């Protein structure tokens, strides 16, 4: 038998010591395989979780609790009244009649989606000054809601900007136009029109990004097949941005049910322009019925979630394949 020399035997033992099988197992502890702490990802999640719980889930929990009390928002005592607030809410139809006002904003949301989709499709391709027009369309969404309310307050006033514009276009005479904010038949249409001007930019950016994410090879294949612009839009663009359209519909439903800024700032909910949210704020801070207002807020949340769930069932978010 061949003997192994001293140096050779030491090398074999050294190699065995470095082999994974002979390496000692790491002790299970706080350190990960790379030497870092195992709970390091939890440290990064701690701050957003604390903020989420503090400013979202904890206030929602308090709101649900307040809805079962008669708290006025000032007194430290909160008497438990059970379902009394919800019974009042369902037995008084005037609180649900304000949902009819949301239909104006719901219809306006489809108008703004159509306008946004049209300009997003147009500006996704070669168009002169397209960056300039993109900025113009998106700019109203960047303006503060209070400032927009004040702008349209002067825009719709008698003899204001809208009346002067209609006179300049030869569509009437000064003093013969309806009271855009004082007439109950026009006030909600006027406010819904203001919401179209403000929120079109948001839908425009969503549609623009989705359209530009469609591969250019798909457009080249459509050109080879001889597709015209309408066929590209119908069979290529619309299926490619289906998810964004579904998201915009969800935002439209939730937004139309929770309109607050424009009617509250411009009219204060007068002349039949009050929405469910403005009525809730009025109950809470004017009549000091925080418990009842909390019940209204809970009911609004349930309605939004229910309608969103129905919409997701009717329009499922399927994967879209363009190839």
Image (cartoon, rainbow, N blue to C red):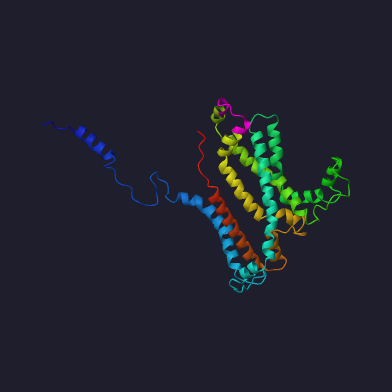
Q: Is residue 64 above or below residue 220?
A: below
Q: Is residue 27 above or below residue 208?
A: below
**For residue 133, what is the image quadrant?**
top right
The image position of residue 55, as x and y in percent, is 59, 57
Residue drawn 62% across the image and 53% down it: 254
The image position of residue 129, as x and y in percent, is 70, 31
Q: Is residue 17 visible?
A: yes
**For residue 236, what is the image quadrant?**
top right
Of all residues shown, which one is farthest toward the top?
224
Is residue 258 magenta-colored?
no
Frontmost residue, 278 versus 231:
231
Query: What main secondary structure does the magenta stretch of the protein show?
Result: helix
Is residue 224 magenta-colored?
yes
Of all residues shown, which one is farthest toward the left?
1
The image position of residue 280, as x and y in percent, is 68, 62
Relative to 141, is 271 on the left or the right? Answer: right
Q: Is residue 35 above or below residue 265?
A: above
Q: Is residue 291 visible?
A: no
**For residue 111, what is the image quadrant?**
top right
Which residues are drawn in magenta?
A: 222-231
């Amino acid at each position: 038998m061949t003997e192994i020399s001293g140096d050779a035997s030491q090398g074999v033992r050294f190699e065995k010591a470095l082999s994974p099988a002979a390496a000692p197992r790491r002790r299970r502890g706080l350190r990960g395989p790379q030497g870092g702490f195992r709970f390091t990802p939890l440290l990064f999640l701690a701050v957003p979780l604390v903020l989420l719980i503090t400013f979202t889930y904890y206030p929602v929990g308090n709101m649900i609790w307040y809805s079962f009390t008669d708290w006025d928002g000032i007194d430290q005592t909160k008497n438990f009244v059970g379902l009394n607030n919800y019974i009042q809410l369902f037995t008084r139809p005037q609180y649900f009649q304000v949902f009819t006002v949301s239909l104006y904003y719901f219809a306006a949301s489809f108008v703004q989606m159509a306008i946004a989709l049209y300009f997003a499709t147009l500006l996704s391709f070669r168009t002169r000054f397209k960056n300039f027009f993109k900025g113009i369309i998106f700019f109203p969404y960047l303006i503060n809601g209070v400032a927009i309310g004040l702008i349209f307050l002067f825009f719709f006033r008698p003899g204001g900007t809208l009346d002067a514009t209609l006179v300049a276009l030869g569509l009437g005479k000064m003093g013969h136009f309806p009271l855009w904010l004082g007439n109950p038949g026009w006030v909600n249409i006027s406010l819904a029109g203001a919401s179209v001007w403000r929120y079109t930019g948001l839908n425009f950016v969503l549609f623009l990004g989705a359209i530009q994410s469609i591969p250019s090879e798909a457009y080249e294949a459509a050109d080879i097949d001889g597709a015209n612009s309408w066929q590209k839009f119908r069979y290529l663009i619309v299926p490619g941005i289906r998810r964004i359209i579904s998201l915009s519909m969800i935002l439209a439903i939730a937004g139309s049910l929770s309109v607050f800024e424009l009617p509250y700032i411009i009219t204060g909910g007068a002349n039949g322009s009050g929405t469910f949210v403005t009525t809730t704020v009025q109950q809470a801070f004017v009549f000091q019925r925080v418990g009842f207002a909390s019940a209204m807020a809970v009911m609004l949340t349930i309605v939004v979630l229910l309608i969103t769930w129905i919409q997701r069932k009717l329009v499922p978010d399927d994967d879209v394949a363009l190839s």
